[in-house]
């Protein structure tokens, strides 16, 4: 993908919050549930990433169509718990500062590996957009000669990721791994995801597109790094973890974090940058999981993460339920009608995102929905967008009921200043 900021912050809605000490449901109990859900979500993400790493190891050790497909299945499964943790961004600085390591997008994939000639070459914005590290064991970066003979996690994280300060130089995380497993999706708005052959990891004369050993090294290094990064984040939500302690040390700021995360993911990030923007541009490159055609699932599980946090309940990958006192419990004491409204809005959002998911699984992939003139696709995407905006309005009303201090919900030009998108 050509680089675009991960999310726009040019417009924000300012809403307010004050103490809920007068309610029977205590803020501390709500925050404990929230932290427990975060810990469980990141632990599940870590477990699924470890399974992905094992599948990658099998692919690299014994390349075949079967082992490639198994690694792709493991990648898709790893997205399910991780997407449900995105609601912990925005309000929690520890998460937001870290998140770009594991889920940054869009990316200039030519930095990593070979791309089709139609991709183009270096640009004024990104001189290394087609560096192709897999094929380049030594290169110059910011005037310095880089020895990339050995592709390691450190090379990816410390040297390549966001190299030259360019956000599109994404060298790590889920989407770098996704590209290495699927390759480019060259179908435009037509059906079909990326079609990387398993022989891209083969040995000897069976190797296609060259440098199969280095491609395997990159894939393994990126997968190892993902496990390492998720191990670190899961630890931040342990009993003595920094993220949990920062949340619990100030109950007012903690409730702020919940509402900021819910509102910002609902509005600016998901409704705006991930959904409305792509539809405005009719650009399949604006898909969140563009190489694998998995965007419908990413949107669905993002929405589910917001619902989890409000209701104070998360179903773990092994079926166990993590639950406790919730923001919903608090609002139901203060304004039962408003709580019922929020629950209804969340259900409506999940219904609309579920329709996108169902349609994609039936053959109308998300990039097909983005095509200009596809009225059915536009209706599906805008159904999700409008539901997310609508639930954000209710989040604003919840904040108003709770009080006075200001919190900021991320905005998006696609929603707040559409003309700026085309400037």
Image (tube, rainbow, N blue to C red):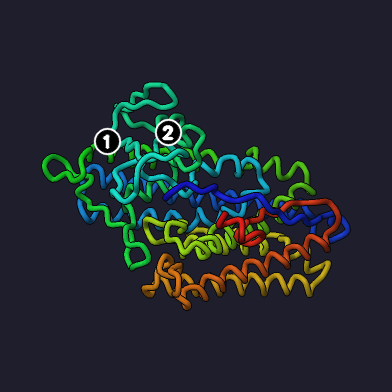
Q: Which residue is tagged 2?
A: 160
Q: Which residue is depicted at the point 45% across and 40% down?
A: 169
Residue depicted at 45% across the width and 36% down the height: 161
The residue at which mark 1 appears reads as: 135
- SS label for mark 2: helix
Residue projecting furthest to the front: 423
Q: Quadrant of residue 373?
A: bottom left
Q: Which of marks 2 and 1 is nearer the N terminus?
A: 1
On screen, residue 83 above or below 109: below
Residues at discs 2 and 1 in contact (Cβ within 8 Å): no
Is residue 46 rendered to the left or right of residue 346?
left
**Left or right of residue 13, residue 235 in this image:** left
At horizontal 19% and vertical 49% (from top left) the residue drawn is 199
- The location of residue 74, given as percent across then percent down, is 36, 54
Q: Can residue 323 be seen in this view?
A: no
Q: How crowded is mark 1: few (under 14 residues within 10 Å), some or many (20 or more)?
A: some
Which quarter shows the C terminus? bottom right
Q: In this view, does 23 lie to the left or right of 82?
A: right
Kindly report the distance in space between the C-alpha atoms of the residues bearing marks 2 and 1: 14 Å
Q: Is mark 1 on a helix, strand or loop?
A: helix
């Amino acid at each position: 993908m050509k680089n675009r900021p991960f999310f726009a912050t040019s417009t924000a809605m300012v809403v307010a919050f004050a103490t809920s000490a007068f309610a029977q449901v205590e803020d501390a109990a709500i925050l404990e549930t929230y932290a427990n859900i975060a810990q469980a979500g990141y632990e599940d993400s870590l477990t699924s990433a470890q399974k992905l790493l094992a599948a990658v190891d099998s692919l690299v050790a014994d390349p075949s169509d079967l082992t490639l497909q198994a690694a792709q299945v493991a990648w898709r499964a790893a997205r399910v718990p991780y997407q449900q943790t995105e609601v912990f961004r925005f309000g929690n600085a520890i998460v937001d500062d870290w998140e770009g390591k594991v889920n940054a997008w869009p990316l200039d994939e030519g930095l990593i590996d070979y791309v089709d000639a139609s991709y183009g070459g270096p640009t004024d914005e990104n001189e290394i957009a087609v560096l192709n590290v897999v094929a380049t064991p030594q290169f110059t970066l910011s005037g310095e000669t880089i020895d990339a003979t050995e592709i390691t996690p450190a090379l990816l994280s410390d040297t390549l990721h966001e190299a030259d300060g360019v956000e599109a130089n994404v060298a790590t995380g889920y989407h770098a791994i996704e590209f290495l497993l699927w390759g480019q999706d060259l179908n435009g708005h037509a059906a079909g995801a990326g079609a990387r052959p398993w022989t891209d990891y083969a040995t000897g004369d069976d190797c296609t597109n060259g440098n199969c050993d280095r491609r395997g090294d990159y894939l393994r290094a990126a997968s190892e790094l993902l496990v390492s990064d998720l191990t670190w984040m899961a630890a931040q939500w342990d009993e003595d973890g920094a993220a949990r302690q920062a949340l619990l040390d100030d109950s007012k700021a903690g409730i702020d974090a919940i509402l900021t995360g819910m509102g910002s993911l609902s509005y600016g990030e998901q409704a705006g940058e991930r959904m409305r923007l792509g539809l405005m541009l009719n650009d399949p490159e604006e898909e969140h999981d563009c190489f694998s055609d998995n965007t419908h699932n990413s949107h669905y599980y993002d929405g589910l993460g917001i619902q989890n946090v409000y209701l104070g309940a998360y179903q773990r990958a092994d079926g166990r339920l993590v639950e406790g006192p919730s923001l919903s419990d608090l609002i139901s004491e203060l304004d039962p009608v408003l709580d019922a409204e929020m629950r209804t809005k969340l259900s409506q959002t999940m219904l609309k995102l579920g329709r996108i998911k169902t349609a994609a699984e039936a053959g109308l992939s998300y990039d097909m929905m983005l095509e200009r003139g596809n009225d059915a696709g536009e209706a599906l995407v805008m159904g999700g967008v409008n539901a997310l905006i609508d639930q954000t309005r209710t989040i604003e009303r919840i904040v108003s009921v709770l009080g006075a201090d200001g919190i900021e919900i991320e905005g998006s030009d696609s929603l707040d200043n559409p003309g700026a998108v085309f400037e």
